Amino acid sequence: MNNRNRGKNTGDDAIFGTEKQIDKLKLAVQDMQYLLSRNYAEKASSDLVGNHYRLKTRQIQALRGASASDLQIQNRKSKELEISDLKNKIIYLDGFNVLILLESLLSEAYIFEGLDGCFRDLSGVFGTYKRVNQTQKVIELIAEFFQKSQVEKIIWIFDKPVSNSGRIRQIIQDFAEENNLNWDVDSEFNPDKFLAENAEIVVSSDAWILDHCKNWFNLVGYLMKEENLSANLIKMF
């Protein structure tokens, strides 16, 4: 096992770890919501708001993830399912999105709760996925959820172009076989589009998927409560 994790970046405590910075971010999210609700483009809005509050690059990243228009919030909330809605259903997992967010959470990186009630992190794949110390624990947490929710089947969808996606798929497939779990692990060239068009129920915190999918479940929110996971959580509103 390597010593990697998805913890905080150097400097994150300075820009996310004080009440003053969090208050500033909350005001920035309010301004973003106002602009997005009036159909301003996201990039232009975040540039404007970022400059106004003198936000650093990672603060702007968090701001974008947490923000949404009134219409987006309403639309996403209307499609959000409860744990009781999942029994005997097939659900699709946005593989890297779920995996990396939970790895970050378990690594004590900062996690941000957005206006839509979804949780997001600041890590990314950037073309290559690297397994970390927390990967196995994440897979076990999803297995716990699978048993408790009485979901019929989980289908994991990974990005085919991402290097090492085959390796993580094999790890999850092996785990499922060893533990007799009804899981499929697949990959797609355009997983976002695939999930939005093909999944009745999707697990993701990707904004585009949430806007275009049929129904979604907030797995990270559920796991934080159910498994009592401690997190460096920042509520952005």
Image (cartoon, helix red, strand yellow):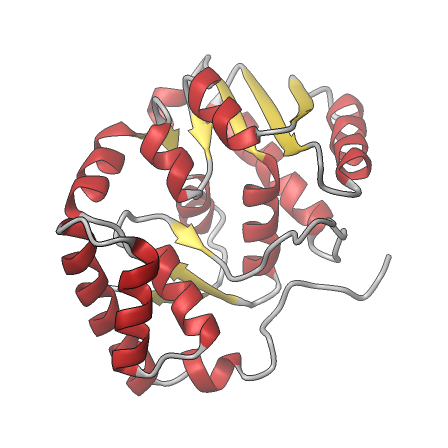
Q: Observer-nearest residue: 133 or 51? A: 51
Q: Which image quadrant for residue 71?
A: top left
Q: Which image quadrant for residue 161?
A: top right
Q: Is residue 12 above or below residue 2?
A: below
Residue at image point 28% right, 81% down? 53
Residue 161 horizontal side relative to residue 213, left or right: right
Q: Quadrant of the N terminus?
A: bottom right
Q: Position of residue 181 (x, y in %)?
A: 67, 21
Q: Position of residue 102 (x, y in %)?
A: 56, 51
Q: Observer-nearest residue: 194 or 148? A: 194
Q: How many marks on residues? A: 0
Q: Is residue 74 above or below residue 178?
A: below
Q: Is residue 39 above or below residue 56?
A: above
Residue lying furthest right in this view?
1
Residue at image point 63% right, 46% down? 138
Residue 63 horizontal side relative to residue 219, left or right: left
Q: Observer-nearest residue: 224 or 125? A: 125
Q: Which image quadrant for residue 6?
A: bottom right
Q: Position of residue 81 (x, y in %)?
A: 31, 28
Q: Position of residue 97 (x, y in %)?
A: 55, 44
Residue 26 in view (yes/no): yes
Residue at image point 67% right, 19% down? 184
Q: Observer-nearest residue: 92 or 83? A: 92
Residue at image point 55% right, 67% down? 109
Residue 114 in view (yes/no): no
Q: Quadrant of the C terminus?
A: bottom left
Q: Is residue 214 above or below residue 140?
A: above
Residue 24 horizontal side relative to residue 34, left or right: right
